[in-house]
Image (cartoon, helix red, strand yellow):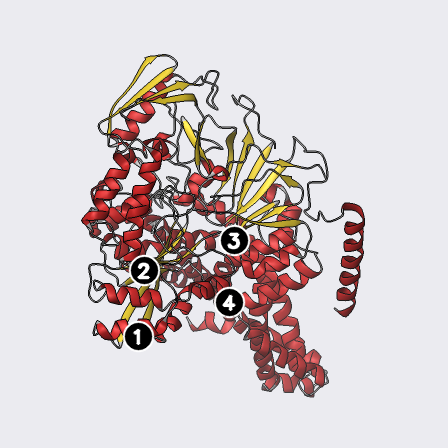
């Protein structure tokens, strides 16, 4: 062991010397060899989709694997450019001044993976089905659509009943994905999209393999094959990276990053997400319907210390993430103050409180442990009820039977949940609801964003929940890999531009 | 012998029937349902209800149970609500990992348990025998997960001899890689189970050494070791078979844990994820198949006892 350490140290020293002499101050490893078009890119992911039916099955893992890679909509979003809306199957779009009519110009030369050409009819049928069939995921995103029509073969016109500034963003989601009209593919086990990759094979419990689609309308994918390797266990994932079994590992455990860095084969990157670690308070249930109690609980949490303990993440004190419109830095609004928390609890007559935290068991135990000791410090006894996600959906999400709950709300632009009193937060504020509907109805982006920011400030001021952190997961990118995307990888993983250097 | 076999077969079927009821009822106690999970956090209660009825989850429980049993009698284990594939074909697919893993683990357990158990008994007054016995006691107490992590650290991370996790994507089409992928997991289960077996074999051997027939044989001029080998071991073997039956169940439980740790796409991992996603028709099929397997092992153990031990045959 001693000899190994000595050897490693001397190797490091020699390496460091070589680096300083050759590259000066630039120590960022860059891909060394030429990009190999025949390469296979292996990416470690943690959550595996249960099947491939992106239209009917929920779960961010399906979008992560398939949207942009296999399936495409008229438009998509670029996470690395603040979630800007960019063209995909439409080359251009125009919005009428009243915000009611969206005219999309369809891209020519697009084919599905089965070889058939994309037609305007495919687009109209896809959108109409998504609107009419409530079992299609995000169908409600299109409920405001009045008509979908195709005046000519290269144009699709969508008319809304009322202006909705989020409509175009909704079109980047599942409801906007385009499928072949009358397709007979078994979508649970196979796929037929228009993206740069086709689904090659699926090994349930193990991996999903995508291969380059040579008939793709745009720049062909940079690698011949992508293997999405599903490794839920963190230490197994670290081992896989250390052993060189994967080129990229997403969501690595910050505690294990040293092991991966130790190989010198990876750069650790951290990107933004819209993933809000939300400590929900049941706003409808005593004593949490008392704002003093909610504020006290927020004051009892030292957010910086929690993030340090978790090893990654950044502070977030409101319901809107930095990648979404309406974000503003609310860090001044609340700060760690257990004395004030005890005072507020005393005022509310809520000393010696007993509360229960319902938390899905997929999250690290650091979070409940930290909360238990933070709350104990101000005289609140927290009982932790660790359940699986299905039980969480039933008890918390469906029946609203909880005091406190923790889940990560990964969706972008989901502020609407705070304007919906029947959502499980149980937060009911007419002013917030008014501001939100105004924000949707305006056609001016800046104005809309200002209105959202105002509404978000109210939600935060009323302590409707606590936002423990904004998740900024760590990605280990192999030094042989170039152009790997950075942001929002937990919901979007566009891999067409990624290249792998020849060995 | 035939009557005995038929009686035991009857018991096997009865055991399966009881198990089917227990499995069905106990799974229905779990909170949460698959429809909500498929529909997700964006769905309205009406959408979830529609999905639930289209999946056949609104039917009364006894109808669901009878449907399931009816399918079983026709040889149909049912269909997954989530993946849409047949439970039997997924089981067969995953068994290609789990069965070899269990067989390799059992081999390791036998190699560790039997020879070293006998050696440890024979040398119980020497340092080596004591060390074996103490070592086995310690190993048997080790949690499988910890043993697995230690093996990974040594053989995969430090030495780099074996893969730390995963199964080759080509599966058994790449037999060498598939075999290598199973070595560490099989060692993990096998060494821990083998240590338990060692302790059992040791005490059975010690007991045999004290028996009259071994002493008689020794008095006739055989060395103690030879007396044990020729007269004692067959008796040790009999009780070992019983213990092995139990250990096979232990190995299957171990496989569920170890498949998780090594991310092996086997029956255990499938079961864990199906429970989490409340794919109950699939879970009950999988559990019943596993129960059936364990009951079958018990049945075979009883039968082989009969065949090997003449005393039991005469008694019936």
- Mark 3 and mark 2 on one chain: no
Identify whether B5 is placed above or below A409. Answer: below
Q: Which residue is mark 1?
A: A342
Is label 1 in contact with label 3 (beta carbons under 8 Å)? no
Measure the C-alpha gap from mark 3 to mark 4: 15 Å
Residue nearest the observer in this picture, B263 or B39:
B39
Query: Nearer the observer, disc 3 or disc 4?
Result: 3
Residue A405: mark in rendering: 2
The numbered disc on residue A350 is none
Give the mark nearest the N terminus, 3 or 4.
3
Would you say residue B47 is visible in this rendering? yes
Q: Residue at x 46, y 63 (%)?
A: A304
Mark-to-mark CA distance, 1 and 3: 55 Å
In this rendering, position of residue B148 left or right of residue A372: right
Query: Do the residues bearing badges 3 and 2 touch, measured as CB atoms within 8 Å?
Result: no
Question: What is the quadrant of residue B117 in the picture?
Answer: bottom right
**Residue B260 percent across, percent down from the top left:** 50, 57
> Toward the viewer: B74 or B189?
B189
How many numbered badges does the structure rendering display? 4
A111 to B185, vertically: above or below: above
Disc 1 with disc 4 on a shared chain: no
Q: Position of residue B251 (x, y in %)?
A: 51, 63
């Amino acid at each position: 062991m001693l000899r190994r350490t000595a050897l490693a140290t001397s190797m490091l020293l020699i390496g460091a010397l070589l680096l300083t002499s050759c590259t000066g101050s630039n120590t960022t490893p860059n891909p060394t060899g030429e990009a190999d078009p025949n390469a296979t890119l292996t990416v470690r992911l943690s959550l595996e989709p249960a099947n491939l039916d992106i239209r009917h099955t929920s779960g961010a893992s399906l979008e992560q694997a398939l949207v942009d890679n296999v399936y495409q909509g008229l438009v998509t979003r670029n996470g690395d450019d603040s979630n800007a809306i960019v063209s995909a199957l439409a080359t251009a779009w125009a919005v009428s001044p009243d915000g009611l009519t969206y005219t999309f110009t369809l891209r020519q030369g697009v084919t599905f993976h089965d070889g058939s050409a994309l037609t305007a009819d495919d687009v109209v049928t896809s959108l109409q089905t998504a609107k009419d069939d409530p079992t299609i995921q995000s169908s409600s995103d299109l409920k405001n659509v009045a008509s979908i029509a195709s005046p000519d073969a290269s144009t699709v016109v969508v008319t809304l009943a009322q202006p909705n500034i989020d409509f175009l963003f909704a079109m980047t989601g599942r409801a906007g994905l385009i499928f072949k009209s009358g397709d007979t593919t078994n979508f649970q086990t196979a796929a037929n999209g228009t993206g740069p990759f086709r689904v090659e094979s699926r090994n349930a419990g193990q991996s999903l393999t995508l291969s380059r689609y040579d008939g793709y309308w745009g720049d062909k994918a940079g690698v011949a094959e992508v293997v999405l390797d599903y490794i839920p266990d963190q230490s197994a994932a670290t081992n896989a990276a250390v052993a060189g079994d994967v080129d990229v590992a997403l969501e690595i455990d910050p505690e294990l990053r040293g092991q991966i860095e130790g190989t010198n084969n990876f750069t650790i990157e951290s990107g933004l997400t819209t993933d809000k670690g939300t400590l929900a308070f049941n706003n409808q249930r005593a004593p949490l319907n008392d704002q003093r109690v909610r504020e006290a609980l927020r004051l009892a949490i030292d957010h910086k210390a929690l993030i340090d303990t978790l090893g990654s993440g950044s502070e977030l004190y409101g319901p809107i993430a930095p990648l979404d419109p309406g974000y503003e830095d609310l860090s001044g609004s609340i700060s760690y103050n257990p004395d004030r928390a005890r005072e507020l609890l005393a005022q509310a007559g809520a000393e010696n409180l007993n509360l229960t935290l319902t938390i899905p068991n997929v999250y690290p135990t650091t979070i409940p442990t930290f909360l238990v000791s933070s709350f104990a410090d101000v005289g609140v006894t927290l009982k932790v009820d660790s359940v699986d996600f299905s039980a969480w959906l039933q008890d918390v999400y469906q029946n609203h039977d909880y005091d406190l709950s923790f889940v990560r709300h990964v969706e972008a632009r989901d502020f609407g949940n705070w304007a919906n009193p029947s959502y499980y937060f149980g937060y009911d504020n007419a002013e917030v609801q008014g501001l939100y509907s105004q924000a949707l109805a305006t056609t001016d982006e800046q104005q809309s964003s200002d209105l959202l920011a105002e509404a978000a400030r109210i939600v935060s001021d009323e302590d409707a929940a606590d936002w423990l952190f904004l998740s900024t997961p760590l990605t280990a990118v192999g030094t042989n890999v170039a152009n790997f995307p950075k942001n929002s990888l937990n919901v979007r993983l566009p891999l067409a531009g990624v290249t792998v250097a020849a060995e | 012998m035939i009557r005995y076999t038929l009686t035991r077969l009857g018991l096997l079927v009865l055991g399966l029937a009881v198990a089917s009821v227990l499995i069905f009822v106990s799974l229905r106690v779990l909170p949460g349902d698959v429809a909500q999970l498929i529909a997700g956090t964006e769905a309205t209660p009406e959408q979830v209800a529609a999905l639930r009825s289209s999946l056949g989850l609104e039917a009364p429980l006894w109808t669901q149970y009878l449907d399931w049993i009816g399918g079983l009698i026709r040889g149909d284990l049912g269909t997954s609500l989530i993946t849409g594939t047949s439970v039997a074909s997924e089981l067969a697919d995953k068994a290609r990992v789990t069965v070899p893993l269990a067989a390799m683990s059992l081999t390791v357990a036998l190699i560790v348990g039997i020879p070293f158990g006998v050696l440890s008994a024979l040398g119980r007054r020497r340092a080596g025998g004591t060390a074996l016995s103490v070592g086995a006691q310690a190993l048997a107490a080790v949690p499988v997960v910890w043993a697995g992590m230690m093996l990974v650290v040594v053989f995969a991370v430090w030495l780099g001899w074996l893969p730390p996790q995963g199964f080759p994507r080509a599966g058994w089409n790449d037999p060498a890689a598939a075999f290598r992928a199973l070595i560490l997991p099989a060692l993990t289960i096998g060494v821990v189970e083998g240590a338990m077996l060692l302790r059992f074999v040791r005490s059975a051997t010690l007991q045999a050494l004290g028996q009259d027939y071994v002493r008689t044989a020794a008095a006739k001029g055989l060395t103690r070791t030879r007396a044990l080998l020729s007269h004692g071991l067959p008796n040790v073997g009999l009780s070992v078979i019983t213990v092995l039956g139990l250990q096979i169940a232990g190995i299957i439980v171990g496989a569920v844990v170890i498949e998780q740790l090594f991310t092996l796409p086997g029956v255990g991992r499938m079961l864990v994820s199906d429970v989490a996603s409340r794919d109950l028709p699939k879970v009950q099929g999988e559990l019943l198949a596993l129960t059936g397997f364990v009951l079958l092992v018990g049945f075979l153990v009883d039968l082989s006892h009969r065949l090997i031990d003449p005393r039991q045959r005469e008694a019936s």
